[in-house]
Image: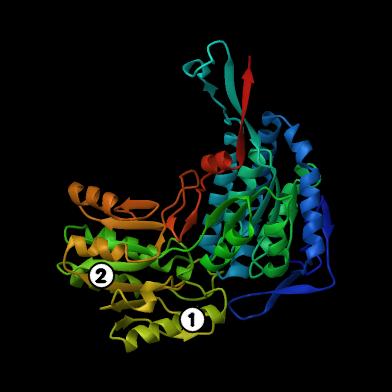
Amino acid sequence: MGGSNRMKMIINGNLVNKDKKIKVKNPVNKSIIDTVPHAEREDAKKAIHAANDAKKAMKDMSSRKISGILYDIHHDLSKIQDEFAVIITKETGKPIRDSKFEMKRSLDTLLFAAEESKRIYGETIPLDAGIGGSKILGFTIKIPMGVLSAITPFNYPVNLAMHKIAPAIAAKNTVVIKPSHKSPLAALKLVELMTPYLPDGVLNSLTGDGKVIGDEMVTNNLVNKISFTGSVATGMSIARKAGFKKLTLELGGNDPLVVLDDANIDNAVSAAVRGSYVYAGQVCIAVKRIITQIGVVDEFTDKLLSETKKLKLGDPLNPKTDVGPLIDEEAALKVENRVKDALNEGAELLCGGKRNGAFYEPTVLDKVSPNMELVLKETFGPIAPIIRVDSVDEAFEIANNTPYGLQASVFTESIEKAKKAVKSIDAGTVLINKQSTFRTDNMPFGGFKMSGMGKEGVKYTVEDMTCSKLVIIG
């Protein structure tokens, strides 16, 4: 990384360091990769004020200019995407090929934003349809929300930052972003790369204690919108403190993969492997429950075991590694304890189930009860828990037996069962014959219930980051 003096915050276009530091550790061996500044509340206030002062510069900039800036950033970022991928892998433990894929998606997101910045439309209003409006012209224009507070988690440090920053800039907003203290390096580097293209204060970064700087980002009256991705508990706290600020909250998931008795089993197994073990299961849309009809459960389980045992657990910088460590040992211990509890309650361990530091083996559990904590709550780990069911109705009932409603996948060859799944399952996205981890960066992404509020996906984010102003000409 080049030493701790490189990774700094940016406030009002200036690199900012602090004497107090946060150590960023490699999940593989706990070695210190780098340090980042430990910001205080005053730093957050300065960043927010800088973003507020920069609003006029963004409002005055043409959409053509904004689009050109985003295209230029895309060009420069694409040339060093592999360098970013290595940083992601070092700070998160994500296998390098998955980090490279994250960078491709991030570039895609940036490109969508560059295109969408020129497609922000208002509409004409037929005022003559109302009493007294016969000779009056009415139309809406879209204006920026203003200052965006963006708070991102550890698992997709560049892509999730890009999903907030790029649409915000496309819609002519200003941004203060706080990445996770567990994986801040790639996000800080991203802000550093983007800043020279923008007026001072448009894009600011902070690192530090969420209870201090995060609280200021949520409560400060100069902030107009908050976009948060993370835990339900933190999301609920933000909602209580935010007041009248506009919110987008992307929270947890407990996504089911339903395998019905007429499913293509090979396809379902492939989806279960990809969905359960990608980034060691530390994804909000990872497959966290495999609900399988009894008629195909044995075939499905045998094939799932065979494919799971082929996965290589190890050094995430090795291109051949399929599953790396969890973000830290504490996270792995939590997974280990939940698996132990499930086994004590009658689940059957078919493979895996061992922990070594922050590493946890890809694990298949059979005969899991829907009432076990492992599947009642969101478990961030490489676990494939199989819940056996007799009927389609039972499968969908269990799929809905969760306070979350992010994404759900159903494998069936029947169009009637697929239609029933779409109508029955309470989730923001229902995927037929595709695992729940499927996401393109232009699709409307967001869940129901405790999975949050609002939608991401560049077009929808841009729309959400603008206000409609009505113009009437008499």
Residue 396 is marked as none
Eye-nearest disc, 1 or 2: 1
In the rendered image, the quadrant that contains the C terminus is top right
Q: Residue 455 in the image: state x and y as whole percent.
A: 50, 48
Q: Residue 269 in the image: state x and y as whole percent.
A: 29, 64
In this rendering, the answer to whether 387 lies above or below 137 is below
In the rendered image, the quadrant that contains the N terminus is bottom right
Query: How many numbered marks have been drawn onto this rendered protein structure?
Result: 2
- In primary-sequence order, the first of circles 1 and 2 is 2
From the viewer's side, name the closer residue of 447 and 87.
447
Q: Residue 122 in the image: state x and y as whole percent.
A: 57, 27
Residue furthest left in the image: 295
Give the image quarter of residue 381: bottom left
Q: Residue at x 50, y 83 (%)?
A: 333
Say what amino acid the circle numbered 2 marks: Lys
In this rendering, position of residue 186 left or right of residue 367: right
Query: Is label 2 in a helix, a strand or a loop?
Result: helix
Give the image quarter of residue 87: bottom right
Camera sees residue 9:
no
**Residue identifier under label 1:** 334
**Residue identifier under label 2:** 303
In this rendering, position of residue 207 left or right of residue 89: right
Q: Residue at x 54, y 15 (%)?
A: 132
Say what amino acid the circle numbered 1 marks: Lys
From the viewer's side, name the closer residue of 261 and 277.
261
Q: CA distance from mark 1 to mark 2?
A: 28 Å
Residue furthest bottom in the image: 344
